[in-house]
Amino acid sequence: MKKIRKNYSLEFKIQAVSLSEQRGNVSSVAEELGICKESLVNWRKLHKEGKLSKEKQISSDPIREELLRLRKELEETKLERDILKKAVGIFS
């Protein structure tokens, strides 16, 4: 039988780490949140190393930033196009 891996958001991980640091007890926080103790320990380690942060997720590469900006603009343009198509259908 295969194990099902859960994917947790970055915000959830950061909040879980901060909560465990406040309380100082990893086991009780992990049990309360319904996650594995080892996962929380790993997240704390990553947080301590600076690898678990929003700043790390965003690349400082200008080409990557341009690509993200263009993808967002494309999605907005597609949405506007679909709205206009529906409007033409309604008014004709």
Image (tube, rainbow, N blue to C red):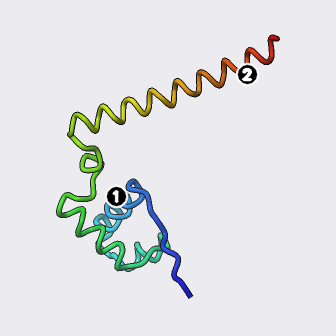
Residue sitting at x 51%, y 31%: 75
Picture disc at residue 40 = none
Disc 1 marks a residue whose amino acid type is Ile
Q: Residue furthest top?
A: 91
Disc 2 marks a residue whose amino acid type is Lys
* Quadrant placement of the N terminus: bottom right
Measuring from the top left, give residue 4's x and y in whole percent: 52, 76
Picture disc at residue 14 = 1
Q: CA distance from mark 2 to mark 1?
A: 42 Å
**Disc 2: which residue:** 86
The answer to whether 47 is drawn above or below residue 79 in the figure is below
How crowded pointer 2 is (Cα within 10 Å; few <14, some 14-19, many 20+) is rated as few
Q: Nearer the viewer, mark 2 or mark 1?
A: 2
User: Of label 2 and label 1, which has the lower sequence position?
Assistant: 1
Residue 63 placement, left or right of 16: left
Residue 60 placement, left or right of 40: left
Residue sitting at x 22%, y 59%: 51
Measuring from the top left, give residue 54's x and y in whole percent: 30, 48
